[in-house]
Image (cartoon, grey):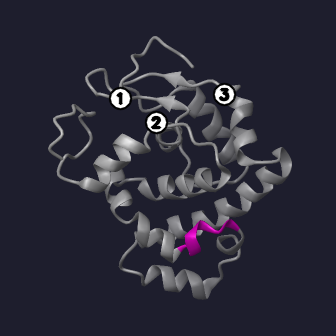
Amino acid sequence: MMDNKVRCKWCNLKNQIYIKYHDEEWCRLNMDDQYLYEMLILESFQAGLSWECVLNKRENFRKAFDHFDIDKVSHYDNEKIQELLSNKNIIRNKLKINAAINNSKIIKQIQKEFGSFSEYLTTFTKGKIINEIDKTTSELSDTISQDLQKRGMKFVGSTIIYSYLQAIGIIYSHEKECFLSRGVDSNE
């Protein structure tokens, strides 16, 4: 992108998908349950890989996972698991695919208990946006991770949850040099 904007160091300037994600989506608050669900599933596939790898396959994930229809995903059977494992356009990791199905069922339970996944997250954040950079975990990500694991979720360690909270805009982490930086001293 030849716009001369300074972006966070992690943003690969040769990848238009990554630039668009950085500029238009990352760290922008989005508490829509459908979005929260999609991002949690995608973040769980990131474990051990780069976010860029997952992001590059995002559209393929949407197609393979029925556009992240939580009701459909939570009922996937062995036949669908085999179909996903043979899909070369997504990350074909059986543990992560099984976790996506399992986690979908747990998210549905959380939605029933709290009214929405957004409301569940708000019980931890009290609606605040946290401005911080140069971290990979925090007390907040530790707490949410522990609660999700206690409920039976997989691939939701503190680092993954921290990255998730950045992705959905609860943690605002654009670097000081980035054109989207708000600085680390302000809170919304």
**Residue 50 visible from this viewpoint:** no
Residue closer to the observer: 94 or 169: 169
Residue 129 magenta-drawn?
Answer: no
Q: Is residue 180 visible?
A: yes
Check disc 1 and report its element: helix, strand or loop: loop
Among the 4 quarters of the image, the one containing residue 49: bottom left
- Dot label at residue 125: 3
The nearer-to-camera label among 3 and 1 is: 1
Residue at horizontal 51 percent and vertical 64 percent from the top: 96
Q: Earlier in the sequence, mark 2 or mark 1?
A: 2
Horizontal side of 168 relative to 150 (left or right) equals left
Q: Name the residue under label 1.
A: 180
Mark seen at residue 101: none
Amino acid residing under circle 1: Leu
The alpha-carbon separation of the residues under discs 3 and 2 comes to 15 Å
The crowd level at tag 3 (other Cα within 10 Å; few <14, some 14-19, many 20+) is: some
Q: Residue at x 64, y 37 (%)?
A: 144
Bounds of the magenta segment = 65-70
Callout 2: SS:
loop
**In this picture, residue 37 sits left or right of residue 179:** right
Image quadrant where one finds the C terminus: top right
Cβ–Cβ under 8 Å for marks 2 and 1:
yes
**Distance of label 2 from label 1 (alpha carbons):** 10 Å
